Image (cartoon, helix red, strand yellow):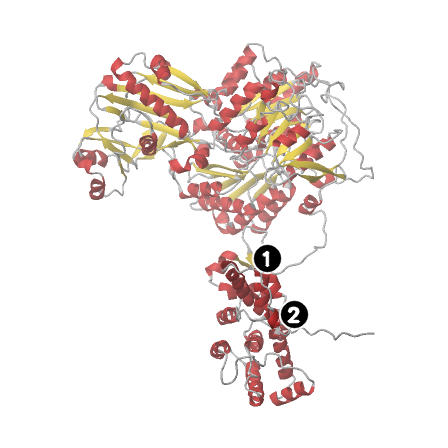
Amino acid sequence: MSAKAISEQTGKEFLYKYICTTAAVQNRFRYATVTAETDWDHITQEHPWLLTERLVVKPDQLIKRRGKLGLVGINLDLQGVQEWLKSRLMRETTVGKAKGVLKNFLIEPFVPHTQEEEFYVCIYATREGDHVLFHHEGGVEVGDVDAKAQRLMVAVDEKLSEDQVTEQLLTHVPDDKKEVLASFIVGLFNLYEDLYFTYLEINPLVITQDGVYVLDMAAKIDATADYICKAKWGDVDFPPPFGREAYPEEAYIADLDAKSGASLKLTLLNPHGRIWTMVAGGGASVVYSDTICDLGGVDELANYGEYSGAPSEQQTYDYAKTILSLMTREKHPQGKVLIIGGSIANFTNVAATFKGIVRAIKDYQGPLKEHEVTIFVRRGGPNYQEGLRVMGEVGKTTGIPIHVFGTETHMTAIVGMALGHRPIPNQPPMDAHTANFLLNASNNSAKTPAATRTASFSEPRTSNDATPAKKCKAGLPAEAQASSGCSGAKATTLFSKHTKTIVWGMQTRAVQGMLDFDYVCSRDEPSVGAMVYPFTGDHKQKFYWGHKEILIPVYKNMADAMKKHPEVDVLISFASLRSAFDSTVEAMQYPQIHTIAIIAEGIPEAQTRKMIKMADEKGVTIIGPATVGGIKPGCFKIGNTGGMLDNILASKLYRPGSVAYVSRSGGMSNELNNIISRTTDGVFEGVAIGGDRYPGSTFMDHVLRYQDTPGVKMIVVLGEIGGTEEYKICQGIREGRITKPVVCWCIGTCATMFASEVQFGHAGACANQDSETAVAKNQALRDAGAYVPKSFDELGDVIKTVYDELVANGTIVPAQEVPPPTVPMDYSWARELGLIRKPASFMTSICDERGQELIYAGMPITEVFKEEMGLGGVLGLLWFQRRLPRYACQFIEMCLMVTADHGPAVSGAHNTIVCARAGKDLISSLTSGLLTIGDRFGGALDAAAKQFSKAFDSGMLPMEFVNKMKKDGKLIMGIGHRVKSINNPDMRVQILKDFVKQHFPSTQLLDYALDVEKITTSKKPNLILNVDGFIGVAFVDLLRTCGGFTRDEADEFVEIGALNGIFVLGRSMGFIGHYLDQKRLKQGLYRHPWDDISYVLPEHMSM
């Protein structure tokens, strides 16, 4: 959602902080907020003026016309304010149809003034620019300002001057107030633009001799501009409409939404209701709400919400469990229903999102059965068959009644079933599995299939592409070609079988989908000419064209792509909401581009309007923002439009039909593909203009294109609550500009039934006046002569009726179906569907990073920290796949500490230092040191453990072991030290010995090694059990006696080198320390001195 209402306090705070005007704005920041928790002593200390001045008090909860409702207390002292609040604070009141509790009040200084000093000013945004309304008589009785006020429209990208304000708005204002008002209004307009307001109303605005007073204010800001305005806005609190409580669950979902690239929305309408929804898609969610209300369920509808944009399994789980938690808090005598619905997804993996929902259902199966919840599911899209199968299975295993339907069932049919208006089929017919469409069973060659259709499916094969515009020189900016006739009106035909596009963004899945579509449409060559991705260098990306692999160039900058691909005339932008504006503006500098599709959702409206203005000047058609794109069967598709190949084939989008449609919603456009393919000969072209308030192209733009396209025989429009674009279609029909049959339905009819305002999933889906409601627009279209069904449920029937009439009168002549070529399925998708299997190249059993949370040997990373396992605990999980006892974890950490370093003279540290001083990097220097570790340096842990274990396990006495090693001429690993001796013990060994003796259950091998030490030190005092040997034998005791390993498992860890890993890990810390030390000391290249080298050369031998 973009335009969001803010509280009066927030709006005034912005104004007082940031307005720039010569007018003296009075009472800056002089307001106090009162709630039920307010401490009056504290508030009077914070605002001492409350004790000395006359006051005004009013609720600050987005309530309109507070004065007329008696909700403003005027000219009171503080005691009067408190008395006034007693009968209102925390009391329920009715405003229009909405009932709510008055919770938040604003107290401000009372401003004595006359009626003549009150004025009205309002600024609001439209597609063309910002309107400034001014009336010289403000206040409670201002009346119909739309009819009475002076009006000035400031076009997009233009500025407002004081002269304009004075001449056009202040004609009825006394001369002595004009200068102040003009300066204030210009300052207010600049504030409105700079802080991305979409609506700002002050009534009354009072002008006295002292200056300007802002008495009452209402405002909305563009919430999508948060990333631009965060520094000035701070953390903005968006209050709910009056009559609807702000629930913590709504805030939780809003927080999830803010942290996700997907869209997650939740509004609680009636927590006591029995009908709950969990709908995928911004448009589909509105359609389901409409249908529930149409069937009499408005009073029982508990929530509005939607999830879309391919949320992860974890995000879907969090969303689903929130709804299940809410709906199982209190019972309903009739039980409850949960409608898990959605249109046919374009790119969301239905099975993946359903996994999250299934997890939530399993977690809540007890409460769901206790509250007698019945679940109805209808969904389509990528991998939907698997999703529906899993959903059906969970119903059987949990005993919860779950009724599952796919694309064979009309989208909203499950609402009638849930509410008892239609029977529930026992075995709904299932569409064919995805695999049946895509796996090529024939032995045909990989050759590109011959061309089949170019015209409408119901017409003779004749080309109806518009004559191409004069080609401009590629890669040159518009200024260089302004006089060459390259600019002009927008094209009627946006796409043909020869259309070439540049895709902005590394969207390989979308591009592959476009190429597969091209292939089944029998195009001669791929529609994607190049890709632009500024975060890598120029390179080529591999894709499939049918059965063979091809390379598509990827460019770092757009200029190179345009210059090298002059045939490209379409740009598909997958740029993020932050970069979409700049990349679109750049693309419009190249006259070869005549169509741009902007996929990103959440672009600030001010930026969108600038793009629209520029596009209109340059004759460029923009589809979007916030869209999936559009499709022209047999010719071209934008990105993910139409979904995967199974849906392309099921909806017959590989060849043109006779019906063209335009929709706001991307998901609903795919639903229209399904409806139209089942009721007519198919789609000729379809466009989703996007859900924002100001789409780049309008319904009328595309309806007129379809009117002028011979292959289009009828037009379908899926309108929406909000905006007035549908009225232009009414006008076009009345004036005879539109003569083809138009079937139209505006979704959002439920909005007029709700007690408080609901912002639906699309940013533009909100009626600001009666004429913008879906009900009003549907009636206007019906009156104008369009075919308007009674509800969305009947849309397919009306389309079929109109189509059948056109067939009957000969306008449409259905042609024989032509089967499309088959396309091999991608390996990754076939595996996703469970159609193939293959042995893995790698196996791992210690870590899994694929889910929402990293897992170490079965333990989530959050649990690792929660349990305070430490480094020793993590090492136990990753090395030994065990949760080791606390003492074992401590011992591991102690071993790492004592082996961390042993000075710069040992070989490993020496190598690291030499390498560092040679200018090598950290990794190279560390590796140089680690490569010296072996039997002679640091590698004695494993060897000592093996030697002592073998001797002890064979029953050999310590003296026998020493004598045998001497007889065999072998050193006893772990015995001996260069410096330390029995008289100068190694304190590292002493520390470890004390800990082991205190905490280990048994130390048999350590005791054996200490007995060996007694024998060896009797011969030579430095033949002590050194730190390597001690760690080796103590670790064997730990593995054998901690209770976590069998004897064979303990021996295996010794055998495979786990103990040497302790030394490698510990000593790495020291090596890195030496590297950093040398860099910090800025030591130069090391060269070994000559006097420390003994040069022994062979004597000269003469012949």
Q: Quick check: 511 left or right of 84?
A: right
Q: Nearer the viewer, residue 452 or 441?
A: 452
For residue 628, what is the image quadrant? Answer: top right
Q: Is residue 583 left or right of residue 1048?
A: left
Question: Helix or strand or loop: what does disc 1 sit on?
Answer: loop
Crowding at mark 2 (Cα within 10 Å: few <14, some 14-19, many 20+): few
Q: Earlier in the sequence, mark 2 or mark 1?
A: 1
Q: Are marks 2 and 1 in contact (CB under 8 Å)?
A: no
What secondary structure is marked by label 2?
Answer: loop
Figure label count: 2
Residue 683 versus residue 846: which sits nearer the camera? 846
Determine if residue 433 is in view.
no
Q: Amino acid at mark 1?
A: Lys
At label 2, the amino acid type is Ile
Q: Quadrant of the C terminus?
A: bottom right
User: Residue 920's mark?
Assistant: 1
Q: Nearer the viewer, mark 2 or mark 1?
A: 1
Give the x, y percent position of residue 1069: 53, 64
State the image coordinates of residue 474 (x, y, percent, origin top left).
66, 25
Q: Is residue 344 above or below residue 1032?
A: above
Extreme front residue here? 1102
Badge 2 is on which residue? 1056
